[in-house]
Image (tube, coloured by chain):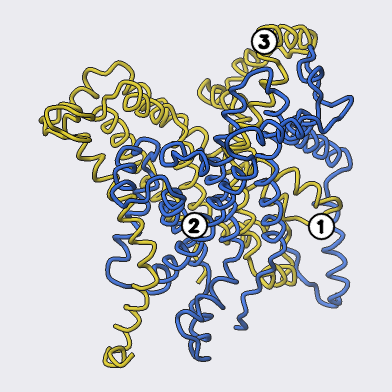
Chain colours: A blue, B yellow
Amino acid sequence: MAVKVQRGQTFSEYWEFRRSRRARKLNRSRAGNALLFGLMVICGVFMVLPLVMIVNNALKPPEEIFRFPPQIFVRNPTHENFTDLFVLMSNSWVPFSRYILNTLIISGCGTAGHVLCASLAAYPLTKHRFPGAKLLFSMVILSMMFSWTVTQIPNYMIISALGINNTYLAMILPSWSYGLGLYLMKQFMEQIPDSLIESARLDGAGELGVFWRIIMPNVKPAWLTLAIFQFQVLWSNTGSLFLRDEELKPLQYAMQQIAAGGAARAGAAAAVAFVLAAIPITFFLVCQSSILETMTTSGLKE
Amino acid sequence: MKRNRMLTLPRKRALTGFLFVLPFTAGFLLFYVNSIVTTVRMSLSEVTVGVAEGVRGMSMQWNDFFNYIRAFSQHATFKQDLTSSLLNMLIDLPLIIFFSLFMALFLNQKFRGRTVARAIFFLPVILGAPAISEAINMARALMVGGISPASAEVMASLGAGTTIDVGYYLYMLGNLAVPPVLINYIIGAVARINNVITASGVQIVIFVAALQSIAPALYEVAKIEGATSYETFWKITFPMVSPLIVTNVVYTIVDSFAKSQIVTLSYDTIFTDYNYGLGAVFSLVSSVAVCLILLMVGWLLSRRTFYHI
């Protein structure tokens, strides 16, 4: 693209020339576009299919659930499965809404606390150099490499030594200091220019002010990502390790119990699967749209 | 407050920094470092759990690295499982990174109907979540009604006319002197496409967040200077997201390790065979191996990473 401006050529002529060249060279052909579009549609269909399946299953009457060969789309949609579910659960020991509430408390508190703790810790780690920062960070990385499914015994010992066994806290507190959040927040905060922080300090902002008014708005995509991630992790937790009382158990556990009921409970199970999938998806969609709408302007004129 | 005034400014800053880090660090040391230390101790000793000779709970007896010797010289599948999980991880890594970067670039563009496209192509983020995948599995199990052999038959009869003769293409590629390693890699990649898609959810979000935080002024400048979109990608977009490529590599390694065979093996050893010491060894050795891989990959990437500060 090395086109020299020739003498006597006006700038607009030159620009026109370049534009025409570019137009010829870089536009894709129509067939290419169609091909790409087709590929994307195929990929998209595969991604949507499981969710379509969940929604349709939840609406199927029993004879359609067990129809063979199986069909994805529902013929005669009913809300029978949901009423079945509520009847089933209202006869049970703990009402269904209690399971939903438990899951919401655990996921909500866990996610909020995690995002806050991780970003609070990530700010000084990135922007101040204080003794022990490097050690802490490498320990966090190391901890991320560790498989936590295997450490259930030590975890249980710690939780029961703290006396928070069989409470919500047993689920919430450990999630606050999970290593991945710190790592993610630190990586994003490194992108914020130091001069932005300095200028805030010159304007008289304290450390907390800098953190809350400068850092957090600038890394909004990061902490929304983290929130999505942590919410899903907590949402999927059955809590069978720490929560013994039936009133404290989350929705995921309830679903396993219902699904274990076999064919008689198939409709109710499909309805639970729908509820279980719908809430994190809604949460995700809300967060995702605001990730994409953040327009970060660096706030600097240099 | 009065005492604070006696401190010098740097010390005061250090103190504030310390206060900020405190909640995270306290929890981290308490819940995570503590567990790692216990696991290391377990790996080095003969562990008995339950009530035995006046022991309540758990007792550990030092046993001269016996667990390590057993793991490396006696256990039937440990070394195989370890190598295969690490290899799988290394194969998936570039695929996931490329796929997620590509998806993020696609989703970050402005085109007609992009709200729908975004909603659809963000789905891997959700599909990867354990709760959802469990719900999907259940839906699938309901649909085939637990009679999977029959449904497999149906699938076979449906697909009979449309299957592509893969062997023929492989033969052709082999004749074209494409090295077998490459062919195997491509076959592996195609076979894994579902894994790659479901495993690249968070990475896509991270990349999109990164693309969002690139200052629009940079693109404006490039446009004024007459850069083509190809040049803009390599000179602006790629360098600006490169720190987060490292992040994503780390995340991918962590994530695929958490789902790998070796973790299942150590879990089974501990909770099915009740061999706590041996299971601890498995998980420690594999963690160290993953750390080494991460150090290597990180070192390779960090030389090409661009930090815009």
Residue A267, placed above or below residue A225: above
How far is mark 1 from mark 2, CA to CA?
39 Å
Residue type beneath disc 1: Arg
How far is mark 3 from mark 1, CA to CA?
58 Å
Packing grade of label 1 (10 A; few <14, some 14-19, many >=20) is some
Mark carried by residue B147:
3
- Please tell me whether mark 3 or mark 1 is closer to you in this view: 3
Packing grade of label 3 (10 A; few <14, some 14-19, many >=20) is few
Q: Label 2's element?
A: helix
* Residue wearing tag 1: A22
**Whole-percent x and y of residue B143?**
73, 20
**Whole-percent x and y of residue A227?**
57, 56
The image quarter containing residue B229 is bottom right
Q: Mark 1 and 2 residues: CB-CB less than 8 Å, in contact?
A: no
Mark carried by residue A184:
2
Residue A302, placed above or below residue A77: below
Q: Is residue B262 left or right of residue B34?
A: right
How far is mark 3 from mark 2, CA to CA?
44 Å
- Please tell me whether mark 1 or mark 2 is closer to you in this view: 2
